[in-house]
Amino acid sequence: MKQAQQPEALPGTVGEGLAQRGISRREFLKFCTSLAALLALPPSMASAVAEAISKARRQSVIWLSFQECTGCTESITRSHSPTLENLIFDLISLDYHHTLQAASAEAAEHAREQAMQDNAGKYLLVVDGSIPLGNPGFSTIAGISNHDMLVETAKGAAAIVAVGTCAAFGGIPKADPNPTGAVAVGDIVKDKPIINVPGCPPIPVVMTGVLAHFLTFGSIPELDELGRPKSFYGETIHDRCYRRPFYDQGKFAKSFDDEAARKGWCLFELGCKGPVTYNACATTKWNDGTSFPIQSGHGCIGCSEPNFWDAGPLYKALSMPVSATPAMLGTAAAAGVAAGVVITWHNRSAKAAAKTAHEKVTVQDLAREDK
Amino acid sequence: MSHLDLLTFARGSALNWALMLCVAGVVLRLFEIFALGRKADLARPRTVSPGSGWRTMATRSLPPEGMLKRDPVTYIGGYVFHLGLLVTIFFFAPHVEFIRSMTGLGWPGLPAPLVDALAVAAMMALGILLAHRLNNPVKRMLSGNGDYLAWALTLLPLLTGYLAYHHLLSEYTLMLALHLFSAGLLLALLPFTKLFHTFSLFISRWYNGDISARKGVAS
Ligand code: SF4
Ligand code: SF4
């Protein structure tokens, strides 16, 4: 990683960087093949990708962390293809990331300012964490509020990647009652292209895939209406879940360790939010394709959706009411009885009034009417 | 408001109010019917026929002789629709889960493709019955706005549920929210429309059977 102490080492082309590190074309092509696969391109495109990338300048990336748990950074460091090392050394120049960088204090801030100056209009801004609007003092870096740092750094960015559900949608800090007044990046920055890469945390290859796309094509990928790249967030977990046949057959686990759970039946009744969650877990999986939450026996909690934390209890089936209780229905029934008493009283008094007002008809009355 | 927020609202406050209106309305109307009372019948019953009310509940649920031939659309359409609707409501696994969460009572659901087929049959029957209602002069004359409202209130949850299940027309989360809204509407209006026959039907059949027996025409 480049440090503040050596600002003269401005990013050259990726090809030059590779040559310097003694990486063979063969190795690089192999790397580009896995990149192409990640971007859902045919393998034949690998050499075109290699061509595009080796001519490109190493992309300057500034990574800002606001109200977050560092889970997103933890996740990206476990990316396998490309590995974070590959990505940092070969493709990008991570100029500022206060968890990963060696520099600290003033030198660190200086690195950010330097990168902003040197690559004005061209750097990629990555943000994780939400921004507190309740009080600027809730979260600051070098005495600068998150809001101000975001606005300042966004100005010269080519595009912004909001990594993690917090940056993309507000995430857990925004969960009811949202004590810090947390908002998403998109709530503050309106004039830059923003790619939302939600997830709590996002899948590492999805993060690196989005960066790779930007590097290869110099543009942002196609997004859905929530700003998420369609290539990774185009389908629900449920659409691609290997337990789906059990769902369709109505075979559900009733508890986490019953016979049905051991047979791998569907986790819907245990609260799985897969049917309403758009993410790539079921296909790319985690830990280098090892597994994903549903495969290890736990339902999806919907972490890549806005306000997932407030979308009803995690272990309540999606079709269950969020907050209705039998007591509530009991109250409603009591209200029904009370209203019934009132109406009955009204009906009965109408009946009684009709009875008293009733006059018997005599033969004379009928005779009179006949005339 | 994202689609998930809409769904949370549909599963939350909107559903709570719909359920409360439904329960309060059903209790209110049943209370009203029973509290209306009947004058004591001082006459000796014409025939002694215990159980006539109960038998009528069953016999009136079958077509009278010759009627199936005379009006097959109404009878067959009616059966297909009601059966499809009942199975869809009470045997689709997510619905069973819903009922279990509210009442503590649960039973195994049926396989989704079977429920799916019956839901389609129910919707087709609803369509045919509407066409028949509009084309048959007697039926049309007998139909008021309340009948068409009841028809629409019943079709909507079936249709949105079907579209949601098959991911048609709109994104799943939104369709699921619409499905819950339509089910909420159905619940909230059920006690105050002709759909109340869900609760009053067998009560009135029993009463008709019983009173008729007293008057000499036991079933
Ligand atoms: S486990 Fe979840 S995502 Fe998988 S089929 Fe069941 S409900 Fe769908
Ligand atoms: S399975 Fe669902 S909750 Fe789990 S990581 Fe994937 S999207 Fe998030």
Image: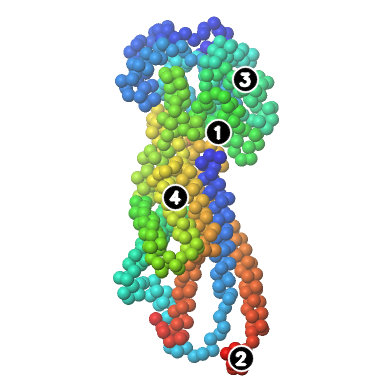
Camera-nearest label, 3 or 2: 2
Q: Nearer the viewer, mark 1 or mark 4?
A: 4
- Mark 3, Cα crowd under 10 Å, few <14 / some 14-19 / many 20+, is few
Subunit ID for the residue under disc 4: B
**Residue beneath the point at 32% across and 24% down:** A42
Q: Which mark is residue A169?
A: 1
Q: Are marks 1 and 2 on the same chain?
A: yes
Q: Which mark is residue A368?
A: 2
Q: Earlier in the sequence, mark 3 or mark 2?
A: 3
Residues at marks 3 and 4 touching, judged by CB atoms closer than 8 Å: no
- Does mark 4's beta carbon lie closer than 8 Å to ligand 1? no
Front-most of residues A87 and A194: A194
Q: CA distance from mark 3 to mark 1?
A: 20 Å
| Chain at tag 3 | A
User: For the residues marked 1 and 2, what is the alpha-carbon distance in whole angstroms?
Assistant: 85 Å
Q: Can the viewer see residue A89?
A: no
Kindly state the secondary structure of the residue where label 3 is placed: helix
Residue A79 figure quarter: top left
Q: Nearer the viewer, mark 3 or mark 4?
A: 4
Residue located beneath label 4 in the image? B160
Pointer 2: residues within 10 angstroms few (<14), some, or many (20+)? few
Q: CA distance from mark 4 to mark 2?
A: 64 Å
Q: Secondary structure at mark 2?
A: helix
